[in-house]
Image (cartoon, rainbow, N blue to C red):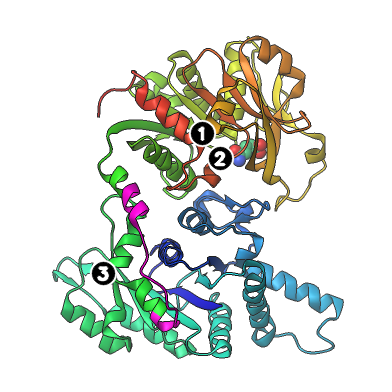
Amino acid sequence: MKYVFVTGGVISSLGKGLTAAALGTLLENRGLKVTLQKFDPYLNVDPGTMSPYQHGEVYVLDDGAETDLDLGHYERFTRTKLTRFNNLTSGQVYQTVLDKERRGDYLGKTVQVIPHITDEIQNRIHQIVEQSKADVLITEIGGTTGDIEGLPFLEAIREFALDVGPGNAVFIHMTYVPYIKAAGELKTKPTQQSVAKLREIGITPQILVCRCEYALSKELRQKISLFCNVRYDAVIEEKDVDHSIYEVPLMLQRERLDDLVCQFLHLDTPAANMTHWQEIIRKLVAPQHRVRIGVVGKYIELNDAYKSVYEAIIHGGVANDCGVEIEKVDAEEIEKSGADKVLKGLGGILVPGGFGERGVEGKIMAVQYAREKRIPYLGLCLGMQIATIEFARNVLNMKGAHSTEFAPATPFPVIALLDDQREVANKGGTMRLGAQPCQLRVGSKAAQLYGAFVINERHRHRYEFNNAYREQFEAAGFLLSGTSPDGKLVELIELKDHPFFLASQFHPEFLSKPNAPHPLFRGFIAACHTAIHHRPL
Ligand code: GLN
């Protein structure tokens, strides 16, 4: 087993997760089995309880773990299957150590950050090694070098690398080389200082990946090499990409990042074959068709809040050789200005998952607009619940129909809590989470798209379609096209007399990849670009 550690310096949001994932793509395409792991220095046990404003999207794994969104990049860019062990937070580390202390496992010793916390961090690396049987483990350390919270993680990987010895571990440090407009120059000082900070801790990075807006000149690379004590050819430029994040692996391959990593780790493999990846990029850069899709949410000003949704839409575009322009629509704007004003001309409408009442009425208006104007609609989780509420109110004439999440006293609780959720008091990790099987109805659009009758999809919700209303909905053409295998939970709905109106209680966006677009997104985009409603771009 070989180890790659990715740290970050200067500023956050450098795209460490993307870079780690892109390196994973390259190593996989050299024939290596790769897995990835993220360390997060915050004290929350997992990001499940954090607001999207704090953290962006919560990414859900098959086993129900609520994790950092970088794990989404890992799964989209590689074949690796991740579990709850692939995301470790300080909160988890401390929880484990304190549980052990209470059990008396430390036999009277003083429990300390070094070695007890750091050992626990290293245990997690060993755990992944045993489980994954990969050739290479890429571990990304969240946060920025110099943060107090990150120190135990850095100390742990320093010790770990020492243990496995040179040739088995490599440190990649990501930094930022800012362009100062007034001087007309790229500046290397922040990079120098952040590398110095790492070396203070005892870590000497062998490779520097430099995020920059402009190309690094030869002189600049020489300077960084000299002052940071890295080989000249190990100063890697990672410029902002022109079109898509899926260009990053190709860009890093041109900079020979994967060659270098293999050299440092004594891995003798052929060069990465990226032909299929280049074809994806071709479809992204020069697609045959174009369409504009509206995503109606309440965190639309935040790019990270619906990360997997946006990516899955783009994958659906790739599957149809169709460029997708995503219009981020604020649900509250629809409430203020009306659906027609905000949504007119869109090729398709999507309502993603969400919690809390703000913007709900705007989302209901968006669904009504899509249903009545026969615009393709895809609803995800809350988007399925909204579709149910809209149909109840406007087709079945159930005035005031709602979800009990938003209106506990509604006369028509078409979306409600299941009994086992009513007892739940704790917020963390207590929703219906992770992969669950779903049975599709013969003859449904869903079954046609999936080409299967039993599927497995990831969940993250508490509320459900209320079974008391099943017959009324079905009689009016609201098809319950997917249920849990025991038939008790509604998982997928679709409208019979509509070009494309489909919504799922699960989150299909977590299982879509650029080279394996999800069937629901493929079908949605196909319906959007063949529909006639949208204005040409
Ligand atoms: N708030 C809804 C529920 O808990 C939907 C959740 C979601 O969209 N992820 O059921």
Residue 276 magenta-highlighted: yes
- The residue shown at (16%, 81%) is 219
**In the figure, residue 275 lies in which quadrant?**
bottom left
Provide residue 215's location: percent of width, then percent of height: 20, 68
Left or right of 386 in this view: 319: left
Q: What label sits on residue 178 in the rendered view?
A: 3
Q: Residue 497, percent across and down?
A: 52, 12
Which of the numbered marks, if any, corresponds to residue 508? 2
Examine the rendering and report whether any part of residue 305 can be seen.
Answer: no
Q: Are marks 1 and 2 in contact (CB under 8 Å)?
A: yes
Say what secondary structure mark 2 lies in: helix
Callout 2 amino acid: Pro
| Location of residue 312 with respect to 340 vertically, above or below | below
Q: Amino acid at mark 3?
A: Pro
Circle 3 SS class = loop
Q: Residue at x 38, y 37 (%)?
A: 317
Q: Which residues are magenta?
A: 263-280
Q: CA distance from mark 1 to mark 2?
A: 7 Å
Instruction: Pick whichever, 170 or 212, lies toward us.
Output: 170
5 to the left or right of 97: left
Calculate the distance from the C-alpha at mark 2 to the C-alpha at mark 3.
Answer: 38 Å
User: Badge 2: how crowded within 10 Å, few (<14), some, or many (20+)?
Assistant: many
Label 1 neighbour load within 10 Å: few <14, some 14-19, many 20+: many
1 or 2: tag closer to the N-terminus:
2
Distance (Cα) linking label 3 and label 1: 41 Å
Residue 520, numbered label? 1
